[in-house]
Image (spheres, helix red, strand yellow):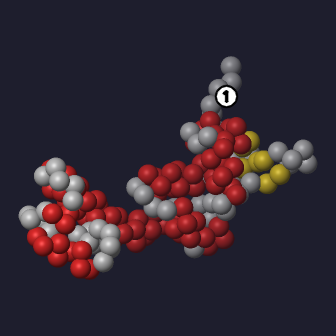
Amino acid sequence: MSDHHALPHPGQELSVGEVAERSGVPVSALHFYEREGLIQSRRTPGNQRRFRREVLRRLSFIRIAQRVGIPLAEIRSALDSLPDGRTPTRADWARLSEQWRTELDDRIHRLQQLRDDFTGCIGCGCLSIDRCGLVNPHDRLGEDGPGPRRLVG
């Protein structure tokens, strides 16, 4: 009895359906990632996509980075920085995640500030920053121009 979930023998390529099943990434997303240059396949004489097994680890890298909020353009740039288009190693992930850590820390800070300011502004019920004597007396922030002023950029 064969196990259809077992990984193929070394060197064997995977169809797009097999990659989708094993990675949990929908076929439509695989096509999108390929169009965006994040993954690569080759075409068979019958014009079917075939992926190397390493694409599974590459997809994990992409999905984890996306989950923490790294934009696809930055993910692509990081993958393009790897020699010979190789699949990211643990060392690659450690280096890249350290680079992204500062950006993520900044994003967390902005979200916390947004959460705290949002609660404060909406809590009074006025929904008008220019009439808020607590947060913005005399509309001081309006003098700086339009848009939200308390959020750091």
Task: Give the vertical position of 106 relative to 54 (above or below).
Answer: below
> What number of labels is visible?
1
Q: Secondary structure at mark 1?
A: loop
* Residue 100 pos. (x, y %): 40, 68
Residue 49 showing in the rendered view: yes
Question: In the image, what residue type sits under mark 1?
Answer: His
Mark 1 — residue?
4
Quadrant of image for the N terminus: top right
Image location (x, y in percent) of residue 16: 71, 42
Question: Where, by quadrant of the figure, is residue 134 drawn?
Answer: bottom left
Query: Residue shown at 15%/63% (left/top)?
Result: 131
Farthest residue, direction top: 1
Picture residue at 56% right of the left edge, 70% below the top: 77
| Circle 1 residues within 10 Å: few <14, some 14–19, many ≥20 | few
Quadrant of the rendered structure where residue 15 is? top right
**Farthest right residue in view:** 45
